Amino acid sequence: MHINKVEICGVNTSELPVLKNDEMQKLFTKIKKGDNIAREQFIRGNLRLVLSVIQRFNNRGEHVDDLFQVGCIGLIKAIDNFDLSHNVRFSTYAVPMIIGEIRRYLRDNNSIRVSRSLRDTAYKALQIRDQLINKNSKEPVISEIAEQLNLPREDVVFALDAIQDPVSLFEPIYHDSGDAIFVMDQVSDEKSEDETWIDGIAIREAMRKLNDREKLILTLRFFEGRTQMEVAEEIGISQAQVSRLEKTAVKHMRKHI
C-alpha cells in the first residue's frame, strides 16, 4: 500500500487545500442553508484529513484507493451529522466517523466471512456500550449490554468475538532492541501435557543438558502452560529475558535431539 503516491482516485493530493477553522465554520453555515458549492469546498478542504486517517490502516493489504473512497464516505457522514453548537472542532468529530467507516468496510470484506446477523448484533452491542459509557462514565460488563439487547450473554460475546480482526501469532508486540516478543510467546500451551514429544526420551535427555534456570523456564512454559509474563514474575526477571533464555534453551536442546 503506497500512501505517498501523488494521485489517489484521480485526486492530486499535493494540491489539496487546507481550510482554517474559521473558514470551515463559514462554509458549514452555508452548507446548512443548502449551498452545494460550499459543501463541495468543505469536502475537498478536508480530504487531507481522510488521507491522515487511512495511514493507520496501511498494514491491512487493502488498496489505498479503496480505503480513501470509504474514508470519504465517513467524511460525508460526519458533515451530515456535525453540529456547530457542540463547540468542538470538526476534525475532532470527523476522525472517529472516518475510522468507524473504514473498520466496517474491513470487517465486511474480511476473508473470514461473518454472517450479517452476527455483525448486526455486534454493532448494536457496540452502540449500547457507547451509550452506557456516556450514561454511567464507566465501561459496562457484557451482562449489562446483553440485558439492553434482550439477548443471552453468550450470544453477545460470540457476536463481538466474530467481528474482531484476526491477529497473526508472529505479530511482534514488544522488543527492547534485542529479540522481539511475539503474540505466540504470550499464549499458554494448555495442550502440552498431551503432546507426545514432551514425554519422549530424547526430550528428557536433552533437558538434562540445560542449566537449572533454563530447565525451570521450559518446565513452566511447556509442562505447566505458563505465559512468558507469568514465568517472568515467578523467576523475578523481565519478560524479554525469559524470551531470550527460552529460545537459547530450545536451541541447545535441538543440538542433542
Image (spheres, rainbow, N blue to C red):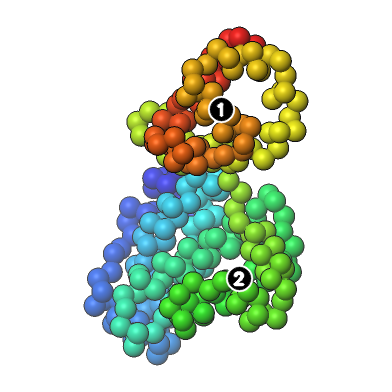
Left or right: residue 166 versus residue 201 is: left
Left or right: residue 159 versus residue 100 is: right
First in residue order: circle 1 vs circle 2: 2
List the residue tagged with mark 2.
142
Badge number at residue 218: 1
The answer to whether residue 114 is visible is yes
**x and y percentages locating residue 29 in the rendered image:** 34, 86
Local crowd size for mark 1, using a 10 Å CA cut-off: few (<14), some (14–19), many (≥20): many
**x and y percentages locating residue 140 in the rendered image:** 53, 74
Q: What residue type is labelled 2?
A: Ile
Badge number at residue 63: none
> Disc 1 to disc 2, how far (Cα)?
36 Å
| Residue drawn at x 61%, y 14% as measured from the top left | 206
Local crowd size for mark 2, using a 10 Å CA cut-off: few (<14), some (14–19), many (≥20): some
- Picture quadrant where residue 45 is located: bottom left
In the rendered image, the vertical position of residue 79 relative to residue 169, given as above or below:
below
Tell me whether circle 1 and circle 2 mark residues in contact (CB < 8 Å): no
In the rendered image, the vertical position of residue 23 relative to residue 62, given as above or below:
below
In the rendered image, the vertical position of residue 17 relative to residue 81, given as above or below:
above
Q: What residue type is labelled 1?
A: Leu
